[in-house]
Image (spheres, helix red, strand yellow):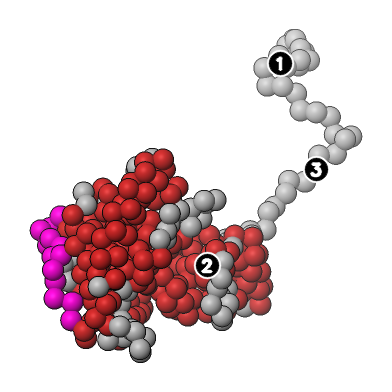
Amino acid sequence: MFIAFAALDAGPPEAPADDGEVEQLVRAARVGNAQAARRLYALHVQRVFRVVRPFCATEAAAEDVTQDAFADALGNLSRYSPRPGARFVGWLVTLALNRARKQHARGQRTEAHEASTLEQLAGAAEGEALEERVLLKRTLLAALAELSPRDREVVTLYFGAELSAAEVATATGVSAANVRKICERASASLSQRLRGPAAA
Amino acid sequence: MREPIIERAFETLEPSPNTRAALQARVEAAYEARPRSLWLEWLNVLRGRPLVNGAWATAAALVLFVATPLSALPLALLPPRAAQVQARPSSPLKPAPRPLSAPRRTAPLPARR
């Protein structure tokens, strides 16, 4: 009977395009639909990883945090209640950010000059300048490491997870107006700094 | 406010396809191994779509109750009805019994001679 209910709640087979379809996937995963849970993972893993990575010393640590965050989120979907203006991705990246914060507080400081080897970026599309990507990544991590913890969280959520200013405000406790200010300031300094290696 | 160069820089933080696949396998294993409680699963089913799933669950419970000997169980638990012996209704012609407290009117005994 339970399996029949889970099958009734099956999510759409194609990639969802809007939040309504994500909510449908969440409902399906909540009643034990593994396919829907897999789809949710595939849709959000990149954004979660982009949020977590600046707070972790290594790729392996970021992978661990991402894995724990997904396992926690997918296993406790009943804790997520959809509200207008609060998307699933916001809830998910907030969970991941909390885990990354804990890991960061445990003393594993971000190493700005971590050896980003070409193997780590070997999955990039062929023909792309891998060296440029490595350089961009290093520069971005170094620039983010120089920000204050609060600004880093705001910038990472806004640019990395592509949340709106209101969603970032909800996740961090900073007012939406302040989020916009921080992002404007960081955007100017980051783009100036990133243009250096990109142009080189 | 979102500059293309910043977006491109954040894209470099994404995991490679190999890393993503390895992560997916680990997350799936963790998802499958999550502790599950039957009551929690049912609660989630009802929370997901309260009306539809609630109606299905009620219908399933009714079918289960009616189509199986399940309904006989509570009936078997009830104590059997004992035959009740009712008192014979009193005849309306029969005089009502006197109250005990009323003084008995008896005829005076004849005097002895």
Above or below, A158 relative to B56: above
Q: Name the residue at 64% across, 69% down.
A: B56
Tell me where residue B52 appears, x and y as whole percent: 64, 65
- Dot 3, crowdedness within 10 Å: few (<14), some or many (≥20)? few
Q: Find out whether residue A91 is within the magenta segment.
A: no
Amino acid bearing label 2: Val
Q: Are discs 1 and 2 both within one chain?
A: no
The residues tagged by marks 2 and 3 sit, at their Cα atoms, a distance apart of 76 Å
Tell me where residue A71 appears, x and y as whole percent: 33, 70
Would residue A61 be found to the left or right of residue B30 on screen? left
Amino acid bearing label 3: Pro
Would residue A125 be found to the left or right of residue A144 on screen? right
Give the quarter of the figure containing the N terminus of chain A.
Answer: bottom right
Q: Name the residue at 58% across, 77% down.
A: A12
Q: Which residues are magenta?
A: A105-117
Q: Are discs 2 and 3 both within one chain?
A: no
Q: Quadrant of residue B34?
A: bottom left
Instruction: Identify the residue at the far right of this view.
Output: B93
* Dot 2: chain letter: A
Residue bearing mark 2? A22
Instruction: Identify the residue at the far left of this view.
Output: A107
Q: Quadrant of residue A158?
A: bottom left
Mark on residue B89? 3
Would residue B81 be found to the left or right of residue A24 on screen? right
The reply to whether dot 1 and dot 2 touch (C-beta < 8 Å) is no
Residue bearing mark 1? B102
Callout 1 secondary element? loop
Q: Nearer the viewer, residue A37 or A198?
A: A198
Amino acid bearing label 1: Ala
Q: Find out whether residue A107 is within the magenta segment.
A: yes
Callout 3 secondary element? loop
